[in-house]
Image (cartoon, rainbow, N blue to C red):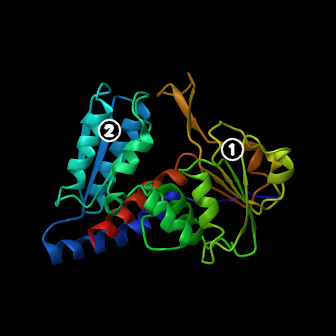
Amino acid sequence: MTGSPRLLDGKRCGDALKTEIATQAAAVKAVRGRAPHLAAVLVGNDGASKTYVEAKVKACGSVGFRSSLIRLPETITEDELLARVRSLNADPELDGFIVQLPLPAHIDADRILQAIDPKKDVDGFHPQNVGNMVLGLPGFLPATPSGICELLKFYHIETAGKHCVVVGRSNIVGTPISILLSRNAYPGNCTVTLAHSRTKDLPSITRQADILVVAIGKPGFITGDVVKEGAVVVDVGIHRIPDASKKSGFRLEGDVDHPSVRGRCSAITPVPGGVGPMTITSLLMNTLKAAR
């Protein structure tokens, strides 16, 4: 292809959606006397998790939400964390909450996530919400896949009849986005291939993708030679790569090798500033939905 691909700017899309969220949050507050309230539980001192949670708290303030950050020591036991989850479930002043992943190795994350009240599960990870998503019933959608759909919608990316290849099958991103993009809706109606680490001859699969969603967790994994010309590329990955030339000491890269892919694709999400802001926006959308 000639020229630069279209940038699917998650910050621009997120800001537009947050303006509407703020309006609706004010309406909720006017009716019931309190703003939507989101809590985030952070266990331990993982740097990336701390950054993510602080960004979510900041985003709440930007749309008029109340937010609470609950910091817990890495040494907390699984039973103690379950007790804290149950107390949040029972708090009538709280509309939704998240438990930031990953959790320390001694805690069973599935057990914790399944203990969250589905009506307060604004991350959309509870089996009840996942089941509702599969069946197309009302519930909370997982934040990152939902954010990707909102981004495709904002930029009017055509999805009906397109071949979408998803690289990575995690329960947080890969599997749910494959379900959402195959549904009879917009964005959706794609023919979806869910590829992963055991897929044979992966390049032959990715070269067929009209829409390529990459959530494999490996920096620079997808290169230009395995991307179909004119494809829409959604890069979900974000990695801190040591870089002495940067003031921070690192640079951010995605799962896609952007320099080689940009010459092939028609549109691509930047890293940072693509999928990340949309994940936070989707969390706000779910919290507003819980408040209503």
Q: Residue 241 occupies which quadrant of the picture?
A: top right
Q: For this rendering, which residue is in front, 212 or 179?
A: 179
- Please name the residue shown 62% across and 39% down the image: 217
Element type at mark 1: loop
Q: Is residue 225 visible?
A: no
Give neighbour class at mark 2: few <14, some 14-19, many 20+ (Cα, 10 Å).
many
Q: Looking at the rendering, which quadrant does residue 5 occupy?
A: bottom right
Residue at image coords 69%, 44%: 256
User: Which corner quadrant of the image does residue 139 belong to?
Assistant: bottom left
The residue located at (50%, 25%) in the rendering is 249
Instruction: Give the amino acid type for the residue marked by disc 2 in the picture.
Output: Leu
- Horizontal side of 163 relative to 51 (left or right) equals right
Q: Residue at x 54, y 53 (%)?
A: 275
- Alpha carbons under labels 1 and 2: distance apart: 29 Å
Residue wearing tag 1: 256
Q: Where residue 231 sits in the image (x, y, percent)?
A: 76, 60
Residue 106: give x, y in percent of width and height.
40, 27
Question: Is 213 situated above or below 33?
Answer: above
Q: Amino acid at mark 1?
A: Val
Quadrant of the image containing the C terminus: bottom left
Which numbered disc covers residue 42? 2
Residue 47 coordinates in the image, percent (x, y): 40, 31
